[in-house]
Amino acid sequence: MKVCKFGGTSVATAEQIKKVVDIVKSDDSRKIIVVSAPGKRFAEDEKVTDLLITLANVALNNKNVEAALENVVTRYRLIGEELGLDSTIAQVIEDDLRNRLATKSNDESLFMDTMKAAGEDNNAKLIAAYFNHVGILAQYACPKKAGLLVNERPERVQALPEGYAQLENLKNAEGIVVFPGFFGYTKSGTLRTFNRGGSDITGSIVAAAVRADLYENFTDVDSVFAANPKVVENPAAIGKMTYREMRELSYAGFSVFHDEALMPAFLRSVPVCIKNTNNPEAPGTMIVSERDYSAQPVIGIATDNGFSTLFVEKYLMNQEIGFGRRLLQILEDEGISFEHTPSGIDNMSVIIRNEYLTEDNRLKIIKRIEEELHADDVHFRETDYSMIVLVGEGMRHATGLTARAATAIARTGSNIEMINQGSSEVSLVFGVDKKDEDKILRELYTEFFQKVKVLA
Amino acid sequence: MKVCKFGGTSVATAEQIKKVVDIVKSDDSRKIIVVSAPGKRFAEDEKVTDLLITLANVALNNKNVEAALENVVTRYRLIGEELGLDSTIAQVIEDDLRNRLATKSNDESLFMDTMKAAGEDNNAKLIAAYFNHVGILAQYACPKKAGLLVNERPERVQALPEGYAQLENLKNAEGIVVFPGFFGYTKSGTLRTFNRGGSDITGSIVAAAVRADLYENFTDVDSVFAANPKVVENPAAIGKMTYREMRELSYAGFSVFHDEALMPAFLRSVPVCIKNTNNPEAPGTMIVSERDYSAQPVIGIATDNGFSTLFVEKYLMNQEIGFGRRLLQILEDEGISFEHTPSGIDNMSVIIRNEYLTEDNRLKIIKRIEEELHADDVHFRETDYSMIVLVGEGMRHATGLTARAATAIARTGSNIEMINQGSSEVSLVFGVDKKDEDKILRELYTEFFQKVKVLA
């Protein structure tokens, strides 16, 4: 049995939803489908989720909600009409939204979650109705009844595996199950949305719970590419990669998949396939536990930027037990997480994402390090740093791979500002100046993928 | 004015001490000399310091001290006789040692410091006597009277710059000043010895206090070499290097100079020259604040071994603020200092000198990390790791240098287990398997120094 997830662009219009039905029809094992809210139909379009956020804010400001409400309902109504459904479904959705608006309380965060989740929830109802309309037995699954349990606030929302036993019953449902992505319920019945990669996570949880043979993640690309196609021309398609490789690439800026979304599938060894709704015949990218990496030690190169380096120097730092720990404590007090900490004898650098830094906390950090750690020098050195990450299961055992990468970077005339190698078995990280990022990516791509078409 | 320090082998015999006098005579600006205790005369010989430790232990065990005492006195007596001095000096030394033995108290550490310091202190008296014997006015300087102040116990012993004003008066002393290395006195009058590189530090402190034009450090090599001569055949001599370069090389296993010893001279910009007592005409190695590194970005390659890697893995570690800090706290609780901390998304490695690790604390650390940090995996990965450190002021700005180094390592067929680059501006660290250390050092030497004879 397969669980299929369809992203926002795959369910944005009647035409797209027809493709979804065709995809499901073409393979009897496609039993459970997880759907997003309708995404953008064209570049300047608004996603339904954004329309719902607007609606929620109007309500929170105690303004008249009718126009904003109508914007949302209209989107569903248009889709329903184009699919040939009668007006019942639009009425169901409008009633649902009015019910949600009525739950408005002082708890803005709770109310916002409830409103946002309406996007997926109602799209699942609409799509289930269309399946039935074209003669395919299908049912909408309510995540609360189905058992998609999440933890209580204020912790970061995560699924509770104790809900899996109940979710597993979806296997036995009659016909196709249409499951809304993006949210679950706490044991006490509170609706919570996933922070990032929401529908991907739902798909992964459901696939894990029913122990699917495959979790198909339908999106709008034929496959994952070995490098960013906006920088590298016609990059090689990745045929097969491991969870670890996908996770490292996602973390370092590959936008296909949010890294956390893989975990539920990974823990139950459910293979994942990334496929294209608009070209379902393309084989896509398989994500599996292991692969033979002898032919292709490196599977992809990711880049990410917007990093700063905090540099701290103190004579005989290396003899001062606890220095590094106290430095990290100061950052922690400011709620700052760090990426890497290269160190010298008398100095230590901490690489931090710029999103954690403000004018104020930079000054505060410097002051505290000077006063509490008696550092001889402390300042933010680079403030526009890029990370280039080579990822591949074969990296650790491929002698000379670092040399090849460093030599390729040298060919571009760029300096390597930082290297982090030695903990992860599947990645090698270079810190470089942002201005050199694209040319380095192209040169590394040429070095490792020049003759490769598909990475299997 | 120059301050000259003569190490143990330079003052081990009458013949050596004659060379010292010749060196001082040959240059009028050589005004203050700092001396070590007599070192080994031949490979199997015992240093006087070791004889003194034996003597102290005999005393602490309440055994008869006469034989052990005679061993020490004899060494000085032989030197004195060969130098043509009368027996007065041997008697002075014997009386001094008996006075020290009489200070035995319950404080073993204090007593041990007092006994060990006798090696340098009495050698300074003997050498001063010999200067006068050959018609050169000279005086022994007592560190207590001269003002070599150190901090109180139990802190690690360090000189207090507030003693400098008094030490500066040595400039005005008549004739040559012979100053014993290795120890100083706290304000309350307690004798404390320097932990490591003792006489080098004394020389550096005195040179700084009198603002010498040059601090000459006489030892038994013509110069500092670019690599270990036991591994690399005829390595290039370093003509000039910076304090930072010397410090990085010293830290990473270069035994010429203890890294801490440079600091006092460095802080007052006193240049240092490492010279050979047995070949004083050789230009030696100058250590200065700055050098032109355009011709030779890398100045030396050091190796050090005996490291282990603690590997810790936890899913979503990167989102857990404080994880790294808590990991380092556990090591700190065990009194363990660390070298480097490469990190991946879900993992972090800590590289630790094996001398800090025992069977017991390894198990305890693993247990605590599992229990307190809920790590998914924690174990000691490599336990026989070497560090290879390329050092040079030009490193940071030499594009392609990392590539050259990594390519050289690849030529040996060895894997690079770890790289640390990005904090220190003058070093690049490779972690490799111990078994590959020598061949990598040779190959890196060939890459960076093949055509170089003297590095100036």
Image (spheres, coloured by chain):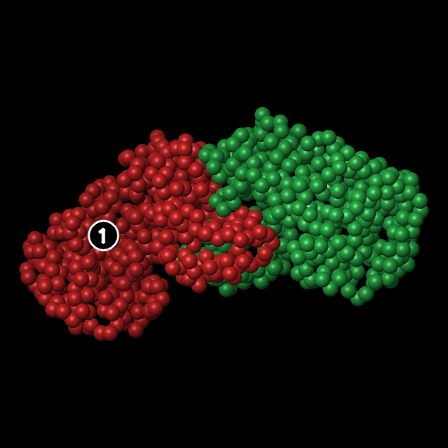
Chain colours: A red, B green
Q: Residues within 10 Å of mark 1 (few under 14, many from 20)?
A: many
Q: Secondary structure at mark 1?
A: loop
Q: In the rendered image, which quarter contains the C terminus of chain B?
A: top right
Q: Furthest residue to the top?
A: B451
Q: Position of residue A288 (x, y in %)?
A: 36, 47
Q: Quadrant of residue B39?
A: top right
Q: Position of residue B190 (x, y in %)?
A: 75, 61
Q: Residue at x 71, y 54 (%)?
A: B166
Q: Position of residue B22 (x, y in %)?
A: 80, 35
Q: Position of residue A423 (x, y in %)?
A: 48, 48
Q: Residue at x 10, y 63 (%)?
A: A67
Q: Residue at x 70, y 50 (%)?
A: B168
Residue A291 visible in the picture: no
Q: Nearer the viewer, residue B161 or A8?
A: B161
Is residue B261 found left or right of B18 in the rendered image? left
Is residue A233 found left or right of A436 in the rendered image? left
Q: In the rendered image, which quarter contains the N terminus of chain B?
A: top right
Amino acid type shown at disc 1: Gly
Q: Is residue B115 above or below residue B106?
A: above
Is residue A352 found left or right of B175 in the rendered image? left
Q: Nearer the viewer, residue A411 or A208?
A: A411
Q: Is residue B27 above or below residue B366?
A: above
Q: Is residue B404 above or below residue B186?
A: above
Q: Residue at x 18, y 69 (%)?
A: A61
Which chain is disc 1 placed on? Answer: A
Tally of marks: 1
Is residue A264 found left or right of B112 in the rendered image? left
Residue linked to disc 1? A7
Q: Nearer the viewer, residue A60 or B152?
A: B152
